[in-house]
């Protein structure tokens, strides 16, 4: 059965969702919802209607199975709940919410209305990351001693444009939500929950661009075994530099890296064969800057198969909630001081 999708928020990532839906023979795009009336031209090209308010779309009674929520972070939870209560399944771009309480409200709405809420965690589909996950499941590294996660990206005035939702506390939330939540998901997926969190935050060159830090050093322990550290920054000059993970275990060391953890940098593990990946993971290229791995096609396929009763969901909503909860714990010690006059005027029109 063809699954009918609508895109809520037709920005960079919304366009990516639409592109993959149009390419999938088992999917159909039926509508775009975006506050910008100038998206009408795009809607005409796609031969679907444009709605400028979510309520307007839901009241139009267009037959739709799934709403893909691709709006600013701070709107995700409220919009997901509104769609679920109107008996639509939802795909929620990262993060599913900016607080654990909001995320749990999404879960309640999903359960009460018996509709799926699929979190977007496309980095899990990257070949290098899947390979490391398999190595850990086989316990080839033995006891895990230490894990270091580095996320060093560029986000400057080309990204934090005045008047945009980017850079605001209530709609963006900070780099751990907007840029690096996918890597925190990978960390938790591989090693489990973290505890004993100690955070240090810095703002090197975004004082007049954002309402939050641009860099942080986070140390923690895993509840199962081992300790870790997360270093991140969006103050890197010019372009994204690195997203890497180094794992030190009793039986070896592995480092994956490159800009998006898409390369095996180092592997010294006894009797472990190092694979070669012929097709490197593509990235979401937004022109002036790049996003994370462009693996959304695997998510769309999984959603279609779940709704057709062919397979189980690859990622449970609880895992999206865990990411939000973890970031909330990390940010608990952050002093949220307004450092820039950035307005979010207009974005509440989605509600």
Image (spheres, rainbow, N blue to C red):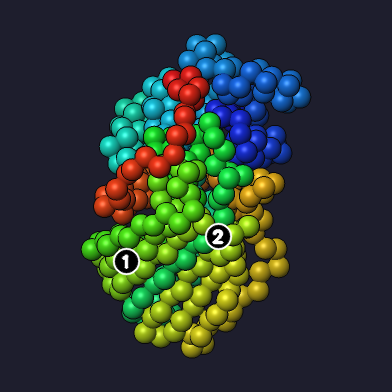
Q: Which residue is mark 2?
A: 236
Disc assigned to residue 126: none
Q: How many marks?
A: 2
Seen in the image, is 37 located left or right of residue 212? right
Where residue 330 appears, as percent x and y from the top left, is: 31, 54
Q: Secondary structure at mark 1?
A: strand
Q: To which quarter of the image does residue 216 belong?
A: bottom left
Q: Residue at x 35, y 69 (%)?
A: 228
70 to 95, vertically: above or below: above
User: Between 291 and 51, which is closer to the camera in this rendering?
Assistant: 291
Q: From the viewer's perspective, is the residue at label 2 or at label 1 nearer?
A: 2
Whether residue 54 is situated above or below residue 102 in the rendered picture = above
Mark 2 packing: few (<14 Cα in 10 Å), some, or many (20+)?
some
Decide which of 51, 236 is in the foreground and name it.
Answer: 236
203 to the left or right of 145: right
Q: Is residue 212 above or below residue 183?
A: above
Q: Residues within 10 Å of mark 1 (few under 14, many from 20)?
A: some
The answer to whether marks 2 and 1 mark residues whose Cβ atoms lie closer than 8 Å is no
Residue drawn at the location 41% of the way across and 79% of the way down: 248
**Residue 327 percent across, percent down from the top left:** 34, 51
Q: Which residue sits at x=61%, y=34%?
A: 11
Q: State the separation of the CA atoms marked 2 and 1.
A: 21 Å
Q: Quadrant of the C terminus?
A: top left
Tag on residue 219? 1
- Name, please, the residue furthest toward the left: 196
Q: Earlier in the sequence, mark 2 or mark 1?
A: 1
Residue 347 percent location from the top left of the image: 49, 25
């Amino acid at each position: 059965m063809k699954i009918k999708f609508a895109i809520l928020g037709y920005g960079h990532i919304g366009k990516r969702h639409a592109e993959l839906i149009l390419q999938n023979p088992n999917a159909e795009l039926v509508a775009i919802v975006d506050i910008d009336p100038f998206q009408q031209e795009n809607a005409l090209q796609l031969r679907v209607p444009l709605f400028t308010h979510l309520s307007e779309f839901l009241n139009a009674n267009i037959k739709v199975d799934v709403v893909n929520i691709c709006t600013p972070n701070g709107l995700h939870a409220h919009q997901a709940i509104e769609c679920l209560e109107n008996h639509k399944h939802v795909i929620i771009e990262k993060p599913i919410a900016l607080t654990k309480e909001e995320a749990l409200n999404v879960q309640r709405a999903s359960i009460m209305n018996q509709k799926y809420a699929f979190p977007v965690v496309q980095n899990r589909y990257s070949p290098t990351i899947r390979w490391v996950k398999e190595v850990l499941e086989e316990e080839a590294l033995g006891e895990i001693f230490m894990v270091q996660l580095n996320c060093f990206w560029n986000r400057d005035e080309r990204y934090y444009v005045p008047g945009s939702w980017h850079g605001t506390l209530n709609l963006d939330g900070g780099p751990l939500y907007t840029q690096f939540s996918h890597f925190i998901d990978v960390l938790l997926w591989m090693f489990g929950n973290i505890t004993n969190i100690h955070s240090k935050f810095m703002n090197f060159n975004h004082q007049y661009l954002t309402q939050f830090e641009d860099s942080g050093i986070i140390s923690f322990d895993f509840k199962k075994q081992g300790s870790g550290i997360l270093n991140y920054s969006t103050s890197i000059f010019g372009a994204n530099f690195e997203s890497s993970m180094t794992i030190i275990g009793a039986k070896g060391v592995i480092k994956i890296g490159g800009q998006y953890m898409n390369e095996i940098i180092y592997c010294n593990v006894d009797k472990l064969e190092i694979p070669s990946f012929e097709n490197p993971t593509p990235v979401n290229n937004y022109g002036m800057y790049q996003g994370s791995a462009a693996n959304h096609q695997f998510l769309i396929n999984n959603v279609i198969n779940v709704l057709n009763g062919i397979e189980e969901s690859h990622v449970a909503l609880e895992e999206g909630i865990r990411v939000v909860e973890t970031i909330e714990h990390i940010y608990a010690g952050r002093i949220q001081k307004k450092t820039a006059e950035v307005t979010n005027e207009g974005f509440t029109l989605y509600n």
